[in-house]
Image (cartoon, rainbow, N blue to C red):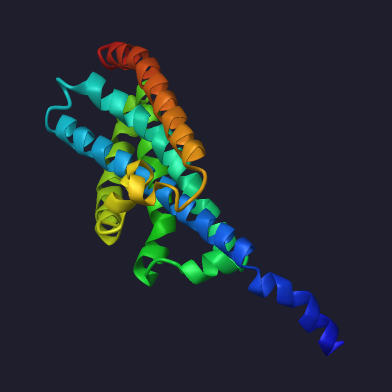
Amino acid sequence: MILAVSVSSHPRATDPTRANEASAGVEGNARITGSLGAAIFVLLLVEGITILRVGQLISLHVFIGMMLVAFAAVKIGSTGYRFLHYYRGDGSYVRKGAPPLVLRALGPLVVLLTIAVLGTGIGALLTHRHGDWLLLHKASFILWFGAMTIHVLGHALETPALAVADMRRGVRDEAPGVAARLGLFAVTLLLAIVLGLLSLGWVHHWQALRFR
């Protein structure tokens, strides 16, 4: 019985092709997550500027906010994919390891607060009780801003390199699936723009409700 187990498990443990493919998959996941994270950072920077004069820049504020919905959803998916494989004991993801404990514990909170901020923003746009939704939007934003600041600083060193890895000749082919990752990013960007354009009509709806 011991011999049978040893023989059956040996090929999987020493198959270099399979191990390389698994490692490339982990790297590919890290790259798309980094690209999405970099895009979110840029959008958040613009969104932060609109907050300074949100009354005059409400259309841009909403447009960028709806773009963030698309990018945040896909990034949550890519991050969730990594952690699902990690906690299932996938060898390549286990070897990659998890983020530091603080970031790991903060992750679910960042996800929940991101959903809360975006959800309450949409609620304020589309419902008659916009005052209540705005209050929730502002409160969740304050909590989210604190959690997101720690999250961004925790990934500040690795994200820039990951974000551009698929566009650098020297390292592009180290992780197969470049076309798929670039395609996913392009589709996410297109969806984000479509959502942003749709939201411009919601702004007019919100303004009409506000001044009734």
Closer to us: 109 or 74: 74
Q: Residue at x 40, y 56 (%)?
A: 109
Whether residue 119 is visible to the viewer of this picture, yes or no, is no
Q: Position of residue 195 (x, y in %)?
A: 41, 22
92 left or right of 51?
right
Q: Residue at x 44, y 56 (%)?
A: 108
Point out the residue furthest to the left here. 52
Where is residue 99 drawn, in percent x and y?
Answer: 40, 66
Above-or-below relation of 82 to 130: below
The answer to whether residue 124 is visible is yes
Looking at the picture, tell me which residue is in the foreground, 79 or 95: 95
Task: Tell me what residue is drawn at x 41 percent, y 64 percent.
Answer: 104
Q: Quadrant of the N terminus?
A: bottom right
Relative vertical location of residue 114 with respect to residue 209 in this rendering, above or below: below
Instruction: Give the quarter of the figure containing the C terminus.
Output: top left
Residue 37 position, x and y percent, is: 34, 46
